[in-house]
Each structure stands twice: as structure tokens, then as C-alpha cells.
Amino acid sequence: MAKTKVITLLGAPGAGKGTQAKMLAAKFGYPHVSTGDVLRDAVRRGTALGEKARKVMEAGELVSDDLVSEIVRERVMAPDAPRVFILDGYPRNVAQACYLQSLEDQADVFVINLRLEEDQAVKRLAGRRYCSGCGKIYNVFFSPSIKEGICDDCGSELQQRKDDAEEVIKERLRVYRQQTAPVVDFYTGRPNFFEIDGNREPDEIAGEMSGLVTDLENRWTAAR
């Protein structure tokens, strides 16, 4: 039986991992699974691991790396696991990457890193504004409204989310450098590691991403 193919996206905050994962899922019909989805599904199904996670979450505590990893393994090895799926939000650190690599008998893991310069990450996130009326998203650096602070479409006031404040973003980037950036080093040089320039427009990135995944699909088909 063919192994499950897992595509996981890496990149700094603001790199567009979620956006690109959704676009890939829509184009190729792959399930887009976040670690939050996996946890909630395990809890909903009442698995032994799901019950452990439920107790931790109900106590208001963070689910440990070990438990998240075990639940990811349970999903990868499930009899009804999809042929290919996009895993969002995992691995977040080297320990999780090592665990995912240990599942190579059950799954082939393909890692795509969206390389983004830190100053671009700050501009993308700190510059983001949303319309309080219709929800339209702007960016003061890349796609500003015609009249500063006012939505072009409905005339409502533009606002900034609290987690888009520059000091919050700098802390998120610090955590990324400390915990997640080493995951890129862990995978660099491996045959199933790919890197894409994330400093471009989303459609340009999506085009290259689509070409890469099409090549992978052709490779998987030829190996059957």
C-alpha cells in the first residue's frame, strides 16, 4: 500500500503559509489539515489521545509537543488517511521535525519553505488594516486605501488588530527565529526539501508552488 504524502509549509510569520496552503488545497483537492484541526478531531472522536488532549485543554493548559506529535502520528497512520494532505502548523520546532521524520515508514514528508525577509514580514503584518464595516483587508505599505484610514468600498474606519502591532510582531519573529527557523536548517539538503521566494505577490508564489506540486504528483504517479 502506498504511503501517505504529507506536504508541510514552513516560513516566518507573514510568509503566507495559510494562504498558500488553502490555494494548493483548492487547486489539487488535498485536505488542508491544521494541528488545531487534528486535535479537535481526536477530541471529537474520543480517542485515547484525544481524551488526554481534552483534559489538558479544559484545564487551560497548552498541549505538549509529545502529545501533539502522537496525535499527528495517529492521523497519518489512520486507515482512512488521505493519499496526500497539507499539514499546517507542524513541525514548529526541531523535536517535532525529528518525530515527523521518524514516521518515514508510514508517510513521505515533503517540506516547502517560503523564504521571507524579516523587514518584509514586519511590513506585511504591521501594515495590515481591516475595514470595521465590510472586512476588506488593506496594507498601508503595499495596498493602501485611497483615503488614509477609510475603506474605499464602504467608507468605514480601518482598524489594526492587536496582534498586528509592531511590538507583538517582533516578539513573534523572535520566537520564530528561536524555535522554528532551526527546522529549516534541519531539512535543508534533504531530497524532499524545497524553497520558494516568499517576497513576491501571492499569485506569483502560488504559480511556482503549483508547478512544484504538479512535478511531485507526476513523480508519485510514475512510482506507482
Image (cartoon, rainbow, N blue to C red):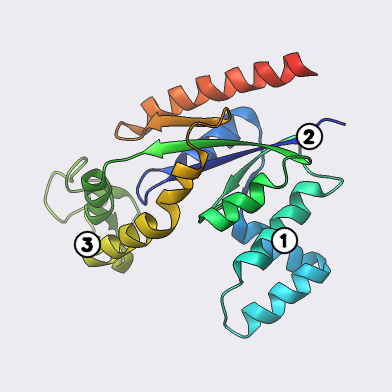
Q: Which mark is residue 166?
A: 3
List x then y, in percent, for residue 30: 66, 36
Q: Which residue is mark 1?
A: 70
Residue placed most toward the observer, 156 or 54: 54
- Precedes in sequence: disc 2 or disc 3: 2
**Residue sitting farthest toward the left:** 147
List x then y, in percent, for residue 140: 17, 48
Q: Which quadrant would the N terminus be assigned to in this image?
A: top right
- Precedes in sequence: disc 1 or disc 2: 2
Examine the image and state in which quarter residue 114 appears. Answer: top left
Q: Secondary structure at mark 3?
A: helix
Q: Secondary structure at mark 1?
A: helix
- Precedes in sequence: disc 3 or disc 1: 1
Name the residue located 72 percent from the left edge and 40 percent from the top edge.
104
Give the amino acid type for the residue marked by disc 3 in the picture: Glu
Give the amino acid type for the residue marked by disc 1 in the picture: Glu
The reply to whether discs 3 and 1 touch (Cβ–Cβ < 8 Å) is: no
Residue 133 visible here: no
Name the residue located 75 percent from the left edge and 64 percent from the top edge.
42
Position above or below: 50 against 155: below
Q: Which residue is mark 2?
A: 3
